[in-house]
Image: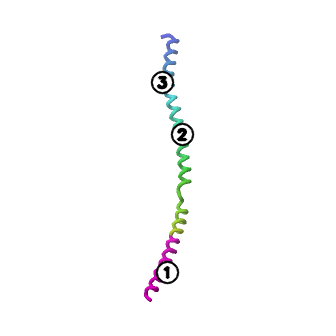
Amino acid sequence: MDLETGHIIWNLILTLIVGPFLWVLKNLIDEQKRQDILINKTREEMARDYVSKTEMREDMNRIITSIEKIDEKLDRISEAAAREYRL
């Protein structure tokens, strides 16, 4: 086997084995970058869309206060109706 045949075989090895390997490796790296970007966007959306514990507590306190006011009004109506029908 002369030197030129060795070069041709080496070029074939590089072309048929190393070339596709590098292409696949590049695609994997690009996909990893794409997934990192998607994960970061998902984190941002979750922070924007979901309520924090503090906000949830404040909202629940407002709801409970409103329910207590309604309960007081119903009690007054019930007492007034009871007084009216006793007469």
Region in magenta = 64-87
Q: Which of marks 2 and 3 is in front?
A: 2
Residue farthest toward the bottom in the current orientation of the protein: 87
Give the spatial CA distance, label 2 vs label 3: 26 Å
The answer to which of marks 2 and 3 sits earlier in the sequence is 3
User: Would you name the residue on which mark 2 appears?
Assistant: 34
Callout 3–callout 1 Cβ contact below 8 Å: no
User: Would you name the residue on which mark 3 appears?
Assistant: 17
Instruction: Tell me which amino acid carries mark 1.
Output: Arg
In the picture shown, does residue 32 fall above or below 81? above
Give the spatial CA distance, label 1 vs label 2: 63 Å
Could you say which quadrant of the image residue 34 lies in?
Answer: top right
Q: Which residue is drawn at 52% across and 39% down?
A: 32
Instruction: Tell me which amino acid carries mark 3.
Output: Ile
**Which secondary structure lies at badge 2?**
helix
Residue 15: image location, x then y, percent:
51, 21
Q: Which of 19 and 34 is in front in this view?
A: 34
Q: Quadrant of the C terminus?
A: bottom left
The answer to which of marks 3 and 1 sits earlier in the sequence is 3
* Prevalent SS, magenta region: helix
Residue 42: image location, x then y, percent:
53, 48
Q: Residue at x 55, y 50 (%)?
A: 45
Disc number placed over residue 54 in the picture, else none: none
In the picture shown, does residue 48 fall above or below 67? above
Disc number placed over residue 76 in the picture, else none: 1
In the picture shown, does residue 7 fall above or below 27? above
**Mark 3 Cα-neighbour bin, 10 Å: few <14, some 14–19, many ≥20:** few
Callout 2–callout 3 Cβ contact below 8 Å: no
Q: Residue at x 51, y 29 (%)?
A: 23
